[in-house]
Image: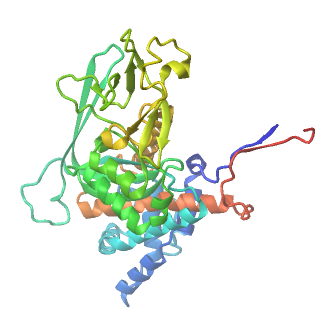
């Protein structure tokens, strides 16, 4: 038997292994920025053209690709790197002074909606080339500190002080191997980037920027609704959405499945009070379950407790199947004959929408899909390390939105360029082939 391995037309490691000039070339070539350029040219009118709009924009892109935290850092790089100047379009033009960049960035703030259009256009183009782009999604929020360290009493905006940022707080809790509990509280002054990414390709799909105090769950509802409005094809092909405990919300879990047929894979918090360990399943005298969705049966004669294995999800009934552990594992059970659960049981997900979800929380499948959630953490890490969010000089929500929008557009443009160039000789097989077995000639 010979096995044809599954092919992948894009992995992010391919881009990380490229040099800065090659990555910048991909961005400049595949960024859909024509509308933005035309708009900025029109706004400039018949004024002086000492520093061309296209060259200024390309240098802004270069600043992100080259991880420059400030305009002065970018200007120094342009001054010493002649190849970079030529690539940006400054052929016989000196490096623009700082005030030119200040004016140019102000024009970008006015045209923020065009940058969001560019992001959506890139998402659509990648969606056409990668038919499974968006099949599995992950959502999370990223804390981004403002350059300002605290609230300013003077609320009058002057372009320098940050009058919009506020305080955010995240709590992390867990249990050590020795059984003791740990807790970590993170506070910051600034903003949040709420991000939905494809958890297979590690590419952004939707985003928004809010102040640090905004609720993750509320923004998740808005992002899903926005994604359905702007990229319905992705919502229709999406099968799962992974998220951590911050998104453990009955309304969100219910909406994902009932409205969009997306299976929620969201970690759960223990909301039971009075140290309650299990609850009896309604109508089942010897069946109990815990807050994590694990279901147990008790032997009516010996009182021995056993975990019931998962039997899958019945889509037409909206029920989870649980199987008899004695039959599945070949265990002797003294009350097998009179046990009403010997042929398995069905649990309607409406029993508790947080605990019982279309992918059984106690199944290996749920654990396998939940591991995909780390994709959004890796995207957030790249924003810090490769796109300059770890160290920046940004104050103000508008500037933060522009910075995030441009960085995410650059990420998608790099991916789009890499996908298209890698497929140059494979245009007949754009669809990812499935793994299959072929009989050998001898067979």
From the viewer's perspective, tell me whether residue 158 is left or right of residue 62. Answer: left
Give 417 or 371, whichever is nearer the viewer.
371
Residue at 61% x, 52% y is 10
Disc tally is 0
Q: Name the side, left or right, on which 63 lies relative to 102.
A: right
Residue 60, quarter of the rendered image: bottom left
Q: Is residue 65 above or below residue 298?
A: below
Image coords of residue 410 (percent x, y): 47, 60
Residue 244: x and y, percent? 35, 40
Q: Residue at x 43, y 14 (%)?
A: 335
Note whether 95 is above or below 291 in the view shown: below
Mark yes or no: residue 247 visible. yes
Seen as rendered, the residue at the extreme front is 338
Q: Along the line of sight, which residue is nearer the eye, 44 or 311?
A: 311
Give the x, y percent position of residue 425: 75, 62
Percent x, y of residue 350:
32, 44
């Amino acid at each position: 038997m010979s096995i044809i391995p599954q092919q992948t037309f894009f992995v992010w490691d391919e881009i990380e292994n490229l040099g800065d000039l090659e990555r910048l070339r991909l961005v400049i070539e595949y960024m859909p920025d024509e509308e933005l350029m035309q708009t900025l040219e029109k706004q400039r009118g018949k004024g002086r053209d000492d520093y061309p709009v296209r060259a200024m924009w390309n240098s802004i892109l270069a600043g992100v690709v080259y991880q420059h935290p400030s305009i002065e850092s970018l200007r120094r790089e342009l001054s010493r790197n002649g190849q970079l100047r030529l690539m940006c379009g400054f052929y016989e033009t000196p490096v623009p002074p700082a005030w030119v960049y200040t004016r140019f960035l102000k024009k970008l703030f006015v045209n923020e909606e065009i940058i969001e259009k560019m992001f959506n256009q890139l998402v659509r183009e990648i969606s056409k080339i990668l038919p499974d782009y968006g099949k599995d999604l992950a959502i999370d929020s990223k804390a981004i500190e403002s350059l300002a360290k605290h609230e300013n009493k003077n609320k009058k905006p002057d372009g320098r002080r940050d009058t919009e940022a506020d305080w955010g707080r995240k709590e992390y809790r867990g249990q050590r191997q020795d059984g003791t509990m740990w807790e970590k509280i993170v506070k910051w002054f600034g903003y949040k980037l709420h991000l939905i990414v494809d958890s297979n390709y590690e590419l952004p799909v939707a985003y928004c920027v809010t102040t640090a105090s905004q609720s993750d769950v509320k923004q998740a509802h808005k992002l899903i609704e926005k994604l359905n409005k702007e990229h319905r094809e992705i919502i229709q092909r999406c099968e799962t959405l992974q998220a951590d405990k911050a998104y453990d919300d009955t309304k969100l879990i219910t909406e994902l499945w009932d409205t969009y047929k997306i299976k929620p894979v969201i970690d759960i918090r223990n909301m039971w009070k009075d140290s309650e360990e299990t609850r009896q399943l309604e109508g089942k005298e010897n069946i109990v379950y815990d807050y994590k969705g694990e279901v147990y049966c008790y032997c009516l004669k010996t009182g021995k407790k056993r975990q019931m294995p998962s039997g899958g999800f019945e889509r037409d009934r909206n029920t989870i199947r649980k199987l008899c552990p004695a039959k599945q594992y070949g265990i002797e059970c003294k009350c097998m004959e009179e046990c009403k659960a010997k042929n398995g049981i069905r649990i309607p997900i409406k029993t508790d929408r947080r605990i019982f979800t279309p992918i059984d929380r106690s199944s290996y499948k749920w654990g396998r899909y939940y591991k995909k959630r780390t994709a959004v953490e890796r995207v957030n890490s790249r924003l810090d390390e490769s796109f300059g969010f770890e160290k920046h000089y940004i104050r103000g929500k508008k500037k933060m939105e522009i910075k995030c929008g441009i960085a995410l557009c650059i990420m998608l443009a790099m991916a789009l360029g890499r996908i298209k160039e890698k497929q140059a000789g494979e245009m007949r097989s754009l669809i990812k082939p499935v793994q299959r077995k072929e009989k050998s000639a001898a067979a």
